[in-house]
């Protein structure tokens, strides 16, 4: 063996201890780490002939790059919809690299990670009160989960027009409808050759992001002779608005359409008895998107795609990986190779398995409840402030607000706030109006963090 690798293996113990120590340094001080890095000049060097080994690289990384790592797993990173990483999830993620399984098949791959992945999906469905009616698999994020659900929807739609889309390519028949789809749904339509411009926009209710059911039904009537795919939002990112799933499902009795539910983070509302009604009827969906790297607080690279088992044949037609004989018959030998976009992939279920096993129903119920409590506290401040106003009622875990007057100062306000490195929020547009969002997703966020953020905001106001 090349001497370098011989040395690395001999030093494995000390390498992993150094990594453990680096991890602890970061995580134990996460609340004090900056939520914003102004100086983004990243040092670059040429590739050396002789490397410096794992310990050497760790040392260089810590010296020059570690300070560039933003505290996104910390308690005051409220931009986008950013989850943290619980200890169990980190343990599972670290071990995913250690075990380095290639999750593919439940039979014959000499590797049982696919079986454990199915078990993890089962646990997740129990947490979210979903029946065992879905084939589930882990993908990189909600974008790929939306892509997967919509890809099978496209196959379904093709079949209704007598076309095998995965083999013959797309035709222009399919109609996709949505009121306020996430940008990743629109992106997925582009990737699927359906076209990102080809979303029939269902009107939203007055002052809401949820669909107007009268307009929806009218559009279903107008398109009765074409295959229709409906994207339903179960939690919009700006105001956590939910389409009325129960009413949409009821329309399935009268009209034929594929129902895809993007419940990337909103699906976790099902953990709380008091919020479960928001998802009533979702078990009737054809496909569902759930993100684990958001409200589940699993590190990035984790989402689940759920597609009804009755569509297994369509799912396999969509994702069948050539006809290589070693793959076996997809109907007899369940293989993720034939159910999801990727072939070789990491044992992505492991961090979620650790989390579900470590924290159970009570743990996730607490995380969701905690985030909602924080959003309500922050929302109450906005509402009572003479300088800010809410742009929507606080629903679940997102506060969408703006300056009451001087709207043109919003970008400056947000930039100054973020540059103070104590709290991070992101800008957005709501009905064309510029707004700021604070999303509460991380289990670490405490009441004190809300107070810190308020103090920072008040100080920035003084500078405007
Ligand atoms: C975050 C999000 C997505 C995209 O998820 P990624 O994990 O970033 O790919 C899709 N839909 C909704 C509702 C989201 O919140």
Image (cartoon, rainbow, N blue to C red):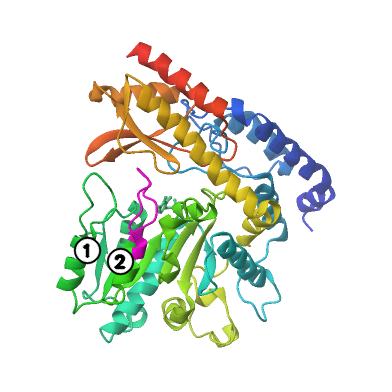
In front here: 385 or 8? Answer: 385
Secondary structure mostly seen in the magenta stretch: loop
Name the residue carrying label 1. 216
- Do labels 1 and 2 touch, CB within 8 Å? yes
Q: Position of residue 314 (x, y in %)?
A: 41, 81
Outermost residue, left direction? 222
- 50 up-or-down from 189: above or below: above
Q: CA distance from mark 1 to mark 2?
A: 10 Å
The label nearer to you, 1 versus 2, is 1
Under tag 2, what secondary structure? strand
Outermost residue, front direction? 274
- 15 up-or-down from 199: above or below: above
Name the residue carrying label 2. 230
Q: Over which residues does the magenta segment extend? A: 232-246
In front here: 416 or 97? Answer: 416
In front here: 242 or 102? Answer: 242
For label 2, count other residues whose C-alpha is less than 10 Å away and answer few (under 14), some (14-19) or many (20+): many
Q: Is residue 15 visible?
A: yes
Q: Position of residue 62 (x, y in %)?
A: 65, 32
């Amino acid at each position: 063996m090349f001497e370098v690798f011989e040395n690395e293996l001999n030093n494995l113990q000390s390498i992993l201890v150094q990594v453990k120590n680096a991890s602890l340094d970061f995580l134990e001080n996460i609340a004090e780490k900056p939520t914003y890095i102004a100086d983004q000049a990243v040092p670059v060097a040429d590739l050396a002939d002789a490397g410096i080994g794992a310990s050497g690289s760790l040392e260089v990384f810590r010296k020059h790059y570690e300070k560039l790592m933003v505290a996104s797993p910390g308690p005051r990173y409220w931009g986008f919809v950013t989850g943290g990483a619980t200890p169990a999830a980190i343990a599972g993620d670290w071990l995913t690299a250690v075990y380095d399984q290639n999750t593919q098949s439940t039979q014959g791959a000499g590797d049982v990670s696919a079986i454990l992945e199915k078990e993890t999906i089962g646990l997740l469905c129990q947490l979210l009160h979903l029946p065992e009616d879905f084939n589930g698999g882990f993908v990189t994020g909600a974008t790929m989960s939306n892509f997967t659900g919509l890809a099978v929807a496209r196959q379904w739609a093709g079949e209704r027009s007598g076309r095998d889309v995965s083999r013959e390519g797309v035709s222009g028949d399919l109609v996709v409808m949505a009121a306020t789809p996430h940008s990743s749904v629109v992106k997925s339509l582009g990737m699927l050759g359906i076209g990102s411009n080809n979303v029939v926009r269902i009107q939203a209710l007055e002052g809401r992001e949820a669909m107007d059911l009268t307009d929806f039904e009218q559009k279903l009537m107008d398109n009765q002779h074409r295959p229709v795919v409906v994207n339903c939002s179960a939690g919009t990112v700006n105001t956590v608005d939910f389409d009325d799933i129960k009413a949409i499902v009821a329309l399935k009795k009268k009209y034929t359409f594929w129902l895809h539910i993007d419940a990337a983070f909103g699906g976790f509302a099902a953990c709380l008895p008091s919020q479960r009604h928001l998802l009533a009827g979702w078990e009737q969906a054809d496909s569902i998107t759930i993100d684990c790297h958001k409200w589940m607080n699993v590190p990035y690279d984790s989402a689940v795609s759920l597609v009804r088992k009755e569509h297994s044949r369509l799912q396999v037609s969509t994702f069948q990986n050539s006809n290589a004989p070693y793959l076996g018959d997809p109907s007899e030998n369940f293989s993720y190779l034939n159910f999801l976009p990727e072939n070789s992939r990491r044992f992505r279920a492991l961090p979620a398995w650790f989390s579900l096993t470590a924290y159970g129903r009570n743990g996730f119920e607490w995380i969701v409840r905690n985030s909602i409590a924080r959003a309500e506290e922050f929302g109450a401040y906005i509402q009572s402030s003479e300088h800010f106003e809410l742009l929507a009622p606080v629903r679940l875990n997102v506060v969408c607000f703006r300056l009451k007057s001087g709207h043109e100062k919003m970008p400056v306000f947000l930039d100054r706030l973020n540059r103070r490195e104590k709290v991070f929020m992101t800008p957005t547009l709501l009905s064309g109006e510029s707004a700021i969002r604070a999303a509460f997703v991380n289990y670490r966020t405490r009441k004190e963090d809300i107070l810190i953020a308020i103090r920072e905001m008040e100080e920035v106001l003084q500078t405007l």
